[in-house]
Image (cartoon, rainbow, N blue to C red):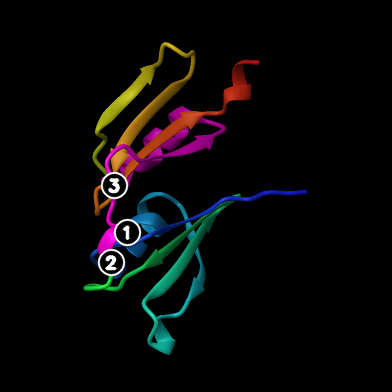
Amino acid sequence: MAVSLRIELFPAELERAVAFYTGGLGFTVEKDDRATGTPYVAVRRDGVRIGLLGSPGTVGDRLPPFGVEIVLEVDDILAERERIVAAGIPLLDDLQRRAWGLTDFRLLDPDGYFLRFTERANAHA
């Protein structure tokens, strides 16, 4: 049975989040419900789908918890880093070879969600 992953984030400013993921990180808009009055946009990049629901005042317990890290595996970590830096997105941690053998870099989205871009684990298999 196939499994896929879709995550939902609850940005304080929906427009800012959509611009960040589509402009800086290379996602495309897959679904946009803003015209119907629902503050929801789904963005996709390859097999990753992120739902962005902007609903000020109703976020409640769904605010970013401590310890959450969204990991995005890419084929070319150097090219990904160059593209993101060229888009003007600041890195929290620049490229590092980790003790577990992979190279990655880290950043925060506009709402403080922790994102780690890493080379694919099977790239060194």
Separation of marks 2 and 1 at Cα, in angstroms: 5 Å
The range drawn in magenta is 59-88
State the mark number for residue 59: 2
Q: Residue at x 29, y 73 (%)?
A: 55
Callout 2 crowding tier (Cα within 10 Å): few <14, some 14–19, many ≥20: some
Callout 3 crowding tier (Cα within 10 Å): few <14, some 14–19, many ≥20: few
State the mark number for residue 62: 1
Q: Residue at x 57, y 50 (%)?
A: 5
Please name whichever residue, 34 or 20, is drawn nearer the observer in this view of the structure: 34
Amino acid type indicated by mark 2: Val
In this rendering, is residue 40 above or below 28? below
Separation of marks 3 and 2 at Cα, in angstroms: 12 Å
Residue that lies at the very extreme toward the right in this rendered image: 1
State the mark number for residue 113: none
- Mark 3 touches mark 2? (CB < 8 Å): no
- Mark 2 touches mark 1? (CB < 8 Å): yes
**Is residue 50 within the magenta segment?**
no
Amino acid type indicated by mark 3: Pro
State the mark number for residue 65: 3
In this rendering, is residue 19 above or below 123? below
Residue 109, x across and y down, in percent: 29, 49
